[in-house]
Amino acid sequence: MVDLDWSALWLSLKVAGWATLLNLVFGVALGALLARRRFPGRELLDTVLTLPMVLPPTVLGYYLLVLIGSHGPLGAWLLDSFGINLLFTWQAAVVAAAVASFPLVFKPARAAFENVDTQLEQAARTLGISEMALFFRVTLPLAWRGILAGLLLAFARAMGEFGATIMVAGSIPGRTQTLSIAIYEAVQAGNDGRANLLVMVSSVVCISVLLLASRLVGRQPGGTRDVA
């Protein structure tokens, strides 16, 4: 019988949850900005924001290491201003997971906002509604399905993040050792029973999330579903 330490699973869920929350705020905001505004360099910004999807995880981890390290621009500011050192903390794992999974929220959010019928927004404006109220009462409710599907995919991606996480957070059992890192450590140690069990747990969680995302994407407004 394999004695499984559940701390890696709970830490992964916490890291993925916080990363998804950050992406909900920044991914939706930037998706709406690029969908609704025209400005020089818009597509270049879109490309930069999508880079984490295609960059090797170690390259992404290196960029984060340079950024949030004690000598990096963000890391040095946090250390000097607040005495906060992000490296090798679970918060660093959140940053890595959020950056790695960001495009999975940003791209669907932009597409969802671009597909909103602008005539409905114009009709709301004629009623004297403010732009902020228009966004939260009209635009966002019409785009929520695509955004939610992206958030679920990003959560699953954050759950499995490894390369960038191990570079900025390390592998400290009970503190920064997420599920994917625990699997790697178990394989390295030759503990096949623990590795198999951790892989099974990770697979069940991710499959459940993906099935939920698939149901959300496949379901049409009004409760109907596509028929093949």
Image (tube, rainbow, N blue to C red):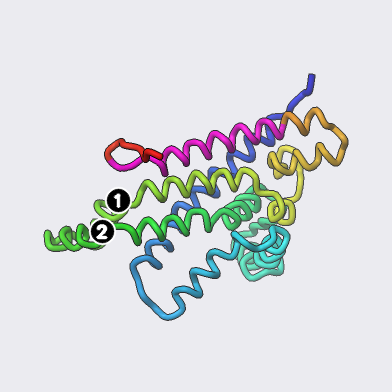
Residue 195 located left or right of residue 103: right
Pick the quarter of the image with the C terminus: top left
Q: Quadrant of residue 184?
A: top right
Q: Secondary structure at mark 1?
A: helix
Q: Secondary structure at mark 2?
A: loop
Which callout, 2 or 1, points to the residue nearer the camera? Answer: 2
Q: Which residues are magenta?
A: 198-221
Q: Residue furthest right?
A: 190
Residue 178 located left or right of residue 99: right
Pick the quarter of the image with the N terminus: top right
Give the mark nearer the N terminus: 2 vs 1: 2
- Residue 142: image tag: 1
Residue 23 located left or right of residue 193: left
Q: Residues within 10 Å of mark 1 (few under 14, many from 20)?
A: some
Q: Is residue 69 visible?
A: no
Residue ID at (42%, 46%): 148
Residue ID at (66%, 31%): 201
In the rendered image, residue 170, in percent from the top left (x then y), is placed at: 75, 50
Q: Amino acid at mark 2?
A: Asp
Q: Which residue is mark 2?
A: 117
Q: Amino acid at mark 1?
A: Leu
Residue contact at pointers 2 and 1, CB within 8 angstroms? yes
In the rendered image, residue 83, in percent from the top left (x then y), is placed at: 64, 59
